[in-house]
Image (cartoon, rainbow, N blue to C red):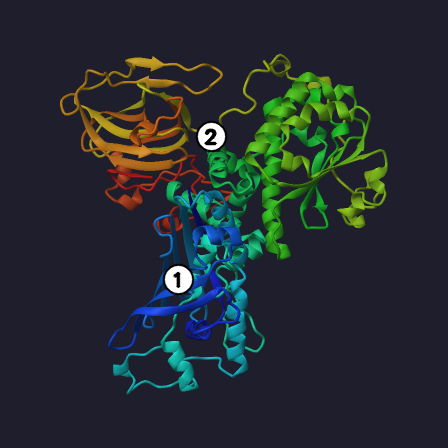
């Protein structure tokens, strides 16, 4: 398996030429890089004007590996080939490195890039990506891989020390500015605006070499000290370089380390890499808008930074949000009067870590009365509203407090809890709520403080705890009796000035008292409601279909006139499919020729077919949009401008990716699609691609626009339909 690493953008708050001078001072030897044994130039070239300088070296690095392993492989050092391309005209340095030693057994590639900051020309950016592929290594493949990745990631940020050391050395020598390269033809008329530095420094700057990459490559092989010589963000009080402060904001393109530290918190190099990897995948498959980085990070943490597992969880959550119109919940939800008066929960200041604080007086809740007066769905929707509000409050706290706030704290007061709360339909509803919240709001609970737990609590805890994620259970603090008032109690987590009055504090808390719901408010249809009905109704225009092998799902659209525009927006919830648009040569009946049903437990509509197997392409039907393979998790939007009236069919067909790759694992031969289609009349098109818009909230409370969406002018509209980028005869994946 190939191990990959992607770094965020590291920002040096110094000009490119100064960073290059610091970079060059490490050579020919560097006491801070003991693993570097030396190098030989095997190729070197310069352009006539001196703007480009290319150096290729064979570099020797010490092997930081167990003695026994060294003896087995019979080497004391490894060799890397590194190519440095310095372009002074564009102010960039590109480093490409790969291993020469054991190249038939191990493939290591690393690419590094220095460039000028896009928003501040006085700053320098550094980016890096690397890959490690161990094919076979004397039976030590797993050991070598673990050693390599561990050492590599441990030393990624250590490189800041090297750059910081040499930049400070330059500053101590009074060198704060090095003029950028200028064309020799223009030097005669150029005006020097900056003080010149000694010629020795210029000479070194003109021949920037590159041992950085060899060093990190060695750590990829056998755990050498990695990437210690070329990264960092230095902010020295001695610097005379003018700095233009660029406040970190939610980025639409690449992530930088300042932004990560400010809005997401301290992450290890591996965690940064996993975040970037998942974010890049979402930008590729979910065109237009993707969740905010803090939201993506929650799913990664919930799956221990396993990108594949986090991706699967996040994709299903995004589809769930779209299906139930969760993104508009904060704007459209109105708290029912019964819940407003009898639901004993509400927000109350924050804890000592600036997390929003929610208080729930569960012991005062009439579960049966609430369910029989407003129903399970209303309670669930209110809980989802509280979670959405929690995300919004956490984001606001992050902006206001100056440090990342990604979760909330909750106090659950169980005073008054009795066996009436262990009502079977109520417990079942609670378990459903926990399941939905766990799947769609992971890592949003910073701490749960359960106070005044009575003797009946263990009964309820036994029923509920198996359904709560282990990482979430670790955040529970349970206090019986008045233990919460002693040392280690609430004052450990909440300032005494904010402890509610009903818990012995001095702070007034306006959370409703709860109490019994009058039976006069009960609704007859809710009293006898079947417990098997889904807890949350579908509040969107999307449909779901199960695409089974040999039974594609097809959507018939009757186009009344030429120029009408067919739009589609669908998500692949499971498996892979091919998507094709057909036009029937003859008019088709609206009655399908076959319907394939699925079990009621599976949900969805099964699949519907309008195209008979006897129909021939080119005779009975024409392909208007060629088959497009859509993978599990993809979100696809597109349009087709019809060339003539008639019957058009959108088809989703099961795609056997295992068969296509000549692999034969056990598969269910079933895919699941959530889709929405719309036919726009030709008058709405008005002859302009940019005038055609169909809109819906796209992750309104959780999302940011990608580069693509910002460039195409995507926007939010009052309508429920999703914004579809209207490129005719093209499927946007």
Q: Is residue 676 left or right of residue 699?
A: left
Could you tell me which quadrant the C terminus lies in? top left
Q: Residues within 10 Å of mark 1 (few under 14, many from 20)?
A: some
Instruction: Using the image, determine if residue 194 lies above or below residue 56.
Output: below
**Residue 208 occupies quadrant:** bottom left
Of the pair 549 and 104, the residue shown nearer to us: 104
Judge by depth and name the residue closer to the eye, 658 or 342.
658
Q: How far apart are labels 2 and 1 at the CA level?
A: 42 Å
Residue 501 disc label: none
Q: Is residue 240 visible to the viewer in this orientation of the structure?
A: no
In the image: residue 69, left or right of residue 657: right
Q: Quadrant of the N terminus?
A: top left
Q: Nearer the viewer, residue 414 or 276?
A: 276
Name the residue at 37% across, 67% down. 93
- Mark 2 Cα within 10 Å, few/some/many (few <14, many 20+)? many
Q: Which residue is mark 1?
A: 113
Q: Which residue is labeled 2 in the image?
A: 323
- Compared to residue 487, the image places residue 236 above or below, namely below
**In what element is the residue under mark 1?**
strand
Q: Earlier in the sequence, mark 2 or mark 1?
A: 1
Mark 2 or mark 1, which is nearer to you? 1
Q: How far across and down, in percent of the image, does residue 669 sit?
A: 37, 22
Image position of 667 with respect to 101: above or below: above
Q: Is residue 239 visible?
A: yes
Q: Quadrant of residue 516?
A: top right
């Amino acid at each position: 398996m190939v191990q990959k690493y992607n770094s965020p953008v590291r920002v040096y708050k110094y000009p490119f030429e100064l960073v290059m001078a610091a970079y060059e001072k490490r050579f020919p030897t560097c006491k801070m890089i003991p693993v570097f044994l030396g190098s030989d130039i095997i190729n070197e070239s310069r352009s006539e004007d001196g703007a480009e300088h290319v150096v290729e070296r064979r570099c020797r690095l010490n092997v930081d590996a167990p003695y026994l392993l060294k003896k087995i492989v019979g080497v004391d050092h490894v060799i890397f080939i590194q190519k440095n391309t310095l372009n002074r005209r564009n102010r960039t340095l590109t480093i490409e490195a790969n291993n020469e030693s054991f190249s038939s057994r191990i493939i290591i590639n690393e690419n590094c890039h220095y460039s000028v900051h896009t928003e501040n020309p006085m700053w320098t950016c550094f980016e890096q990506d690397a890959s490690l592929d161990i094919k076979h290594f004397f039976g030590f493949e797993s050991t070598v891989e673990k050693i390599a990745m561990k050492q590599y990631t441990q030393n990624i940020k250590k490189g800041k020390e090297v750059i910081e050391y040499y930049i400070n050395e330059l500053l101590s020598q009074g060198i704060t500015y090095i003029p950028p390269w200028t064309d020799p033809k223009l030097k005669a008329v150029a005006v020097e605006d900056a003080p010149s530095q000694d010629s020795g420094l210029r000479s070194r700057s003109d021949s920037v070499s590159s041992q950085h990459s060899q060093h990190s490559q060695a750590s990829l092989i056998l755990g050498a000290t990695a990437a210690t010589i070329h990264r960092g963000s230095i902010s020295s009080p001695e610097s005379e370089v003018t700095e233009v402060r660029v406040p970190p904001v939610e980025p639409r393109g690449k992530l930088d380390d300042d932004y990560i530290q400010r809005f997401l918190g301290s992450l290890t190099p591996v965690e940064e890499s996993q975040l970037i990897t998942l974010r890049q995948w979402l930008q590729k498959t979910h065109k237009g808008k993707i969740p905010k980085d803090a939201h993506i990070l929650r799913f990664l943490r919930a799956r221990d930074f396993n990108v594949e597992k986090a991706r699967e969880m996040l994709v299903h959550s995004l589809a769930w949000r779209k299906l139930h119109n969760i993104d508009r919940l904060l704007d459209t939800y109105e708290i029912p009067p019964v819940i407003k008066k009898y639901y004993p929960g509400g927000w109350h200041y924050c804890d000592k870590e600036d997390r929003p604080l929610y208080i729930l007086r569960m012991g005062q809740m009439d579960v049966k009365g609430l369910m029989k007066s407003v129903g399970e769905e209303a309670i669930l929707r209110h809980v989802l509203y509280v979670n959405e509000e929690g995300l919004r409050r956490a984001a606001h706290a992050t902006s206001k407090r100056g440090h990342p706030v990604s979760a909330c704290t909750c106090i659950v007061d169980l005073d008054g809890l009795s066996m009436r709360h262990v009502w079977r339909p109520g417990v079942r509803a609670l378990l459903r709520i926990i399941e939905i919240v766990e799947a769609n709001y992971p890592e949003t609970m910073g701490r749960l403080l359960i106070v005044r737990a009575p003797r009946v609590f263990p009964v309820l805890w036994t029923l509920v705890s198996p359904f709560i994620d282990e990482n979430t259970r670790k955040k529970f603090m349970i206090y019986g009796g008045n233990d919460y008032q002693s040392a280690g109690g609430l004052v450990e987590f909440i300032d005494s000035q904010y402890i509610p009055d009903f818990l012995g504090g001095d702070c007034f808390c306006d959370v409703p008292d709860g109490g019994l719901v009058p039976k006069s408010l009960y609704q007859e249809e809710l009293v006898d409601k079947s417990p098997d009905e889904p807890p949350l109704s579908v509040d969107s225009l999307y449909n779901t279909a199960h695409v089974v092998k040999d039974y594609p799902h097809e959507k018939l659209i009757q186009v009344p006139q030429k120029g009408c525009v067919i739009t589609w927006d669908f998500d692949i919830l499971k498996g892979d499919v091919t998507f094709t648009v057909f036009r029937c040569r003859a008019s088709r009946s609206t009655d399908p020729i076959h319907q394939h049903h699925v079990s009621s437990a599976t949900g969805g509509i099964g699949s519907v077919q309008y195209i008979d197997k006897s129909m021939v392409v080119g005779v009975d039907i024409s392909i208007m949009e060629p088959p497009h393979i859509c993978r599990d998790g993809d979100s696809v939007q597109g349009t087709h401008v019809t060339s003539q009236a008639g019957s058009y069919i959108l088809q989703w067909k099961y795609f056997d990716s295992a068969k296509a790759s000549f692999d034969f694992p056990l598969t269910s031969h079933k895919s699941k699609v959530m889709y929405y289609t719309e036919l726009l009349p030709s008058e709405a098109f008005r002859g302009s691609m940019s005038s055609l818009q169909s809109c819906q909230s796209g992750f309104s409370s959780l999302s940011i626009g990608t580069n693509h969406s910002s460039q195409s002018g995507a926007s939010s509209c009052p309508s429920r339909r999703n914004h579809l980028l209207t490129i005719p005869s093209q499927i946007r994946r």
